[in-house]
Amino acid sequence: MSELSVEHLLGIKYLKSTDIDLIFKTADHFKEVINRPIKKVPSLRDITIANLFFENSTRTKLSFELAEKRLSADVINFSAGQSSVKKGETLIDTVNNILAMKVDIVVMRHGNVGAGVFLSNHVDAKIINAGDGTHEHPTQALLDSYSIREKLGSVKGKKVLIIGDILHSRVALSNIFALQLQGAEVKVCGPTTLIPKYITSLGVTLETNLKKALEWCDVANVLRVQHERMDVNYFPSTREYKQLFGINQEILDNLGKKIVIMHPGPINRGVEITSEVADSNESIILDQVENGVAVRMAVIYLLAQQVKR
Amino acid sequence: MSKKILLNSKDIELILHRLACQLIENHNDFSNTVLIGLQPRGSYLANRLSDLLKNKYQVKEIQLGLLDITFYRDDFRRREAPIEATATEIDFLIEGKNVVIIDDVLYSGRSVRAALTAIQSYGRPENIELLVLIDRRFSRHLPIQPDYRGRQVDAINEEKVLVTWNETHKKDAVYIEFK
């Protein structure tokens, strides 16, 4: 198969496992490209891409922009802070105005759940969801799985633990879908206040004891505590969170086996993970960032194939 | 659809030896020369030539790379079915090197045009030559001609030139297919 089964990348839940295989195979080629002396291919030179970020982002935005530029696409950027959104313009109006400038692909991050799906129903462009509220962040999940595949050979049959703020995390949800689609086992761990009530209905298991959970897993994906999304206190103090769910070198040393440590960033050093662990050999946090560019290049390239001339 | 054999394995063997000798005439000990096979089909020819030069002609070391040109093609979004990429394996820089691009069939010249762009990602070569097994005359879309050719063929556009290798089809041969 050399074509995606979907027209937009709105979430992992719309993908088939063959789509993920295709994205990874294509990403392998792009990973070679971005390690060349000249890290650029001319494939998308007649494609224009708009990056619409209605919510703050550093890493994802840079990663997308770099991926687009490495494919030779023309790129326009938009951040809600400095735009007419503040003047009361609706989402569809904003995007249609941008599309009137002949844009082929829209990469969008938005605070509202389902913003990508909504947009894909109303405008004529390929949509890539770069995070919609607490819902999905598909490219992050793809690059996480890609990094696991790179480090451990495959994702199938691996035991992956997701630790921390599952309730507010789009990374967690997309990761659960992606890992299950590829045949991995998923367990979540965190304070019960930050775990959605019906999480086990997704087919994942739940463990509130960090040590037991770590003993079970091959890979631990540590999530950030998202203070900005919390309207009330979900746990008594950062200090308590750190003591119960923070990962430090001592816990890892006592496991009796090596596990892979991941983090989607940005890291709260000393809260969910100590600096020692984040910078250790077990951590593949910076590989994730590198792979992010290759995976996003693959997604953009494969969707651009479908753009009509 | 009928098929006519153009070259059998004996012919191909002879041609490979001749091409190897021609390469040696121009490149001596290959100390500043790299061979680049175009993926996927040119890589078999490139591997054969490299083995031949090393085993039969006592060339000590040959730098051989495989180049995929999918992302450099000029027909992206213009084809019916998308093309799948193959791996690129070039673990050396080509800055200042003499490059020999190797492919099995030279037809429109568009793959070679893409390869000329792609190869620049690895540095600025001193010069670039082109070696092909089959040169289909009269079908070029671009002003590109080979420096080394195995056999020139006057096939018309409706005919297809098919190269099979021991590695893929258990037989070295070149056919012309008539539709």
Image: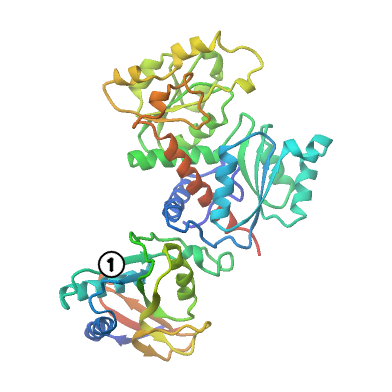
Give residue B130's position: percent from left, percent from top. 38, 79
- At 75% from the left and 56% from the top, the residue drawn is A101
Q: Residues within 10 Å of mark 1 (few under 14, many from 20)?
A: some
Q: Nearer the viewer, residue A128 or B61?
A: B61
Q: Is residue B88 above or below residue A95?
A: below
Give residue A131's position: percent from left, percent from top. 61, 36
Side of A245 where A157 appears, left or right:
left
| Amino acid bearing label 1 | Gln
Most distant residue in the bottom direction: B154
In this figure, what is the number of numbered marks?
A: 1
Residue B42 seen in the current view: yes
Q: Nearer the viewer, residue A143 or A176?
A: A143
Residue B170 seen in the current view: no
Q: How is the image coloured?
A: rainbow
Quarter placement of the N terminus of chain B: bottom left
Q: Is residue A214 above or below residue A155?
A: above
- At 61% from the left and 29% from the top, the residue drawn is A134
Q: Secondary structure at mark 1?
A: strand
Residue A210 position by quadrant: top left
Q: Nearer the viewer, residue B160 or B145?
A: B145
Most distant residue in the top direction: A236
Side of A168 where B32 appears, left or right:
left
Q: Is residue A204 above or below residue A74?
A: above
- At 39% from the left and 74% from the top, the residue drawn is B126
Give residue B139's position: percent from left, percent from top. 49, 86
Q: Chain of mark 1?
A: B
Give residue A67's position: percent from left, percent from top. 54, 50
Residue located beneath label 1 in the image? B63
